[in-house]
Image: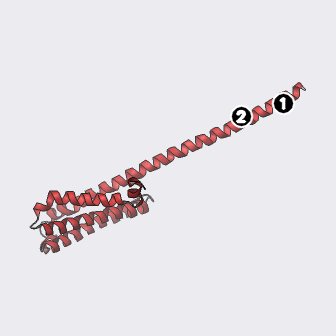
Amino acid sequence: MSGKSFLSKYKLYHFLFWILLFGGWYFFRYQDFSSQSTALKMILAKVIDLAILVYVTNYILIPELLYKKKYVLFGLIYVVLVVGFSMLKMYIEGQIMGRPDLFNFNTNLKVRIYDNVIPHFLLVSTGAAFKIMIDYGRAQRRLGELAKEKAETELNFLKCCVTSYMNVTDKRSQLKRK
């Protein structure tokens, strides 16, 4: 079994993507925390939070609501989901760091929104955009294949018609000669 089909079959490229994201995020941000264990916990919480949001959006909300033209419901659930997960992430971060005030929206509301809600919207929307682009590409490829099959079917039909006509014409000319 080739490596590519094994990765695709079990969707391991998803797992590899999230591991790479975790590693990159840790590499660039571990020094921002008081200890490496705190950095690991915080970054793991952020990656898990983002992964859940991306998968719920891409595999539930987009196919079940957006593609079925339930735009208002999609938008409402999307906003509630992102804001809710942002609040949950702030709570978890406060617990990990021993600073429950990180969850408090009463102090520095603008900072809380800027640091948590807006990045969630941007990151999850980017993931959704990739999903929509990939689905669009697949749909275009399918439409191309269907157009090709239709053209081949029409061509075969026309060949049959021409062949039948030629056979009839040949038989008529043979009968006229006799």
Disc 2 on helix, strand or loop?
A: helix
Rendered-image quadrant of the N terminus = bottom left
- Amino acid bearing label 2: Val
- Report the residue at 79% width, 30% height from top: 169
Q: How many angstroms separate mark 2 from mark 1 (CA)?
A: 15 Å
Q: Residue furthest right?
A: 178
> Image quarter for residue 164?
top right
Q: Earlier in the sequence, mark 2 or mark 1?
A: 2
Rendered-image quadrant of the C terminus = top right
150 w.r.t. 109: above or below:
above
Give the color scheme: rainbow, by chain, secondary structure or one colour: secondary structure
Q: Give residue 97's position: percent from left, percent from top.
A: 13, 71
**Is 102 or 161 nearer to us in this picture?**
161
- Amino acid bearing label 1: Arg
Q: Residue furthest left?
A: 34
Q: Give residue 105's position: percent from left, percent from top.
A: 16, 70
Residue 18 visible in the current orientation: yes
Q: Residues within 10 Å of mark 1 (few under 14, many from 20)?
A: few
Please tell me the numbered disc located at residue 162.
Answer: 2
Q: Give residue 48's position: percent from left, percent from top.
A: 27, 66
Q: Residues within 10 Å of mark 2 (few under 14, many from 20)?
A: few
Please tell me the numbered disc located at residue 172.
Answer: 1
> Image quarter for residue 77?
bottom left
> Image quarter for residue 32?
bottom left
Disc 1 on helix, strand or loop?
A: helix
Residue 104 visible in the current orientation: no
Q: Give residue 104's position: percent from left, percent from top.
A: 15, 72
